[in-house]
Structures are given as structure tokens and as C-alpha cells.
Image (cartoon, rainbow, N blue to C red):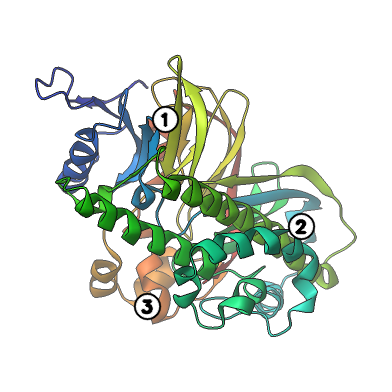
Amino acid sequence: MPVFIEFNKANSKGDVPIKVYTHAIDPKAITQLKNTATLPIVGPHVAAMPDVHLGVGATVGSVIPTRNAIIPAAVGVDIGCGMNAIQLSLRSTQLPDNLALMRSAIERAIPVGLSAHKRISARDAACNPLAASLEKITKAHPDIKKRLKKADTLWVTQMATLGSGNHFIEVCIDEAGYVWLMLHSGSRGMGNAIGSYFIERARKQIENRARKLIDKNLAWFDEAQTDFHDYMAAVNWAQEYARINRQEMMKLTLRAIEPFLPKFTITHEAINCHHNYVEQEQHFGETLYITRKGAINAKRGQLGIIPGSMGDKSFIVRGLGNADSFCSCSHGAGRVMSRSAARQRFTREDLATQTRGVECRKDSRVIDEIPAAYKNIDDVMNNQSDLVDIVHTLKQVICIKG
């Protein structure tokens, strides 16, 4: 289906248009999008994906093109957060009857929440290429490290770790009965430190230049500023860290499940895609910085991953290269209620009912991730039929939450 709603189409104030791929959008998210559309650096328009919902400063599920500038808070603090998925040669009938043992093995192999690996040596090979560039970034901006305890080693021990919130590792079955591994994580503590540091720095610089913003979280760096180039170096580092983090986590997951399964091979090349990131791209005859805050690249032929909530379906998709969406699509189902609202409304019994058939945690600490706190994934997919084609439909049988 085409764009559902368009705001600012004939705006006399000069605000750029906003193209929204759903009717189901919170009024507060609309306000955020309109605030973004007022910025002189934004254009030719802003796009909002079907999973759009309220964020901090910039709206989650938005695609923000900027000219010669970048908004650090639009990228956010979970820089490079994204997905990784692989298909295995195994069929669902080859999985063990007791999935709890497989789940426990994965949880032992992959630290979750605030936990990290205890030994550094296991991840030296992955981290060494990142070390020199990180040293250059933190030498220019030493306050980045001050935001982390044991900053010199934490980024290494957090390599191949899951994190918390909606990050997850899943064993899934596709429509043909094949087994997939899928996981969701980002750049962990160092990415958060980089993001929060530059967001604060951008706010202060806008204040110093006496610019008034509707929302201070929309402060930006211009290409003429040294901080712009320092931020780009740092954000590129965090995006690469996030990609490698998922890659290394997938290796550990494969190693953890091997003892429970017959011999298998990887039959589908790994898809490893960001959905909180910025990169320079060509659109509408311009070179733009495209920030996808909760959106993935869906250029023509590009494979991507759109997960549902725990207990729901997920999708492997192929991009259609839709120009109005800046060749983007949704990054998931999108929340319909806050974490605190979900915890107040639902019980452990509700969680157990909505995740029936999935081997996963069903305790009070993950109630905020209950499927009912998210949009219906089928509605989201129907709303972006102009953006992607569905290649595979996955349903999880094991879910590890951060």
C-alpha cells in the first residue's frame, strides 16, 4: 500500500512533508515528527515506518534525511543496534524434545543484561581491529571513557554479549520447517557512552550558538564542525562494533547448540543489518545523511530482518527500493505501550498465555516485553507491502531475553 498519511504537504512555514506508512500512530509521535520537520537541515521529507512510535527526541520508526549535518539523538545511544539471522540445514523434527536444555546452554554461553564475559582473550581476535580507532576517538574525547566503569576492558568483555531490554536470541522455524537462528543486539556500553556524550555535546553547542530548538534533543552538528567529523568516526566505530558483536554472538550460539543436534550446515548466508544508524546515501538526486532510527535498509534486492514480539512471527524480507521511504522499511512490530504501562497492566499469567509454545523466560522481569505491548506484526507487514517482499516467515520455539 502507498503512503497512508502526509503532513505538512502545503506548509506555509517551510516545514518539510512527513510521509507515514500507517494510520496507527500516537499523537505524541506525530508531534515529534513535526518537530523534526521544522529543522533547516532536514529534507526533502521525513518518512515514518508502520512500526512508528514515540521516542526520545526523534521518533522510533522514522527515517530522517539531513543535508550536511547529523542529529546525534536521532541515531540514539544504542548505535548500530540491529539483527543477525542464519538458516540451518536442520528441520524442526531434528530439534530435541527438551528445548529447555538448549536454551540453558545458550544462556550460559552468552551473557545477558549488564553481564559481560569474564575472560578477555576469547574475543581478542574480534576486538583487535577496533582498538586503534577507539584509542584515537577517546584520545580526542576522553570524557567518553568517564561514562563507563573499567572502560578500557569493558568494551572487550562485552563483545559477544546480548544486553537488556528488547534484545534477544531466538531459535526459529520457517514456513518450510527449517531451523533458523536469529538475534538482536547493538554496540553495548561503549556505544551508549559514545552516543550520550555526543548528544550532550551537540545540545551545548546549539545553546552556545544561541539557536532555539523546539526540542533540545534535535541538536545537530554541521559538516563544518570538527565535532561532526569526530562524531562520524565514533558512530562508524560503534556501528562496526555492533555488527561484529552480533557476528561473534552467533558463533557462540552455534557452538552452544551443537551438542544437542545432529551435524548441520549453514544453508543461508548470514543477514547482519543495523536498524539504529546513519550513513551517507544518494536520494532524489542529492547526497544526504540518512538516519534510520528504528528502520532498516530496504533498497531493491537487499535482504533484511523484521522481528515480531516474543511469541509472535518474524520475517526475512527483500527490499523493493521504495523512493518515498528512502529505501527503508520497519525494524519490527513497534510498541503500543510503554514498558511501565505494560508492567502495570499485565501479569505473569498473561505472559505465559501469550508465549505458549515458546521456551523462554516467563517471569515478572520480562513482562514489559509481552506481545500485547507491541503492534500486530501482520498489520505492520501489510502496511509496508510497497516497501518489502516477504521471503520467509519465522516462528520462534526458543527465546532468550536480555
> Which SS class for mark 3?
helix
What residue type is disc 3 on? Answer: Arg
The amino acid at mark 1 is: Gln
Q: Secondary structure beneath disc 2?
A: helix
Where in the figure is residue 29, as x and y percent of width and height?
A: 22, 45
Q: Name the residue under label 2.
A: 93
Query: Label 1 neighbourhood size at 10 Å, few (<14), some (14-19), many (20+)?
Result: many
Q: In this view, does 12 lie to the left or right of 263?
A: left
Q: Count neighbours of disc 3 (C-alpha within 10 A) and say few if under 14, some if 14 to 19, many if 20 or more.
A: some
Q: In x, y percent, where is residue 276?
A: 47, 49
Determine the residue located farthest toward the right in the rendered image: 263
| Residue drawn at x 64%, y 42% as measured from the top left | 175
Q: Mark 1 points at which residue?
A: 384
Q: Identify the residue shown where x is 86% and y is 52%.
A: 265
Q: Which residue position holds label 3?
A: 348
How far is disc 2 from disc 1 in space, using C-alphas? 33 Å
Left or right, 399 with respect to 10, comes to right
Of the residues under marks 2 and 1, which one precedes in the sequence?
A: 2
* Mark positioned earlier in the residue sequence (1 or 3): 3
Question: Is residue 237 shown to the viewer in this render?
Answer: yes
Q: Tell me the SS state at disc 1.
A: loop
Real-space CA distance between mark 1 and mark 3, rounded to the nearest whole angstrom: 33 Å
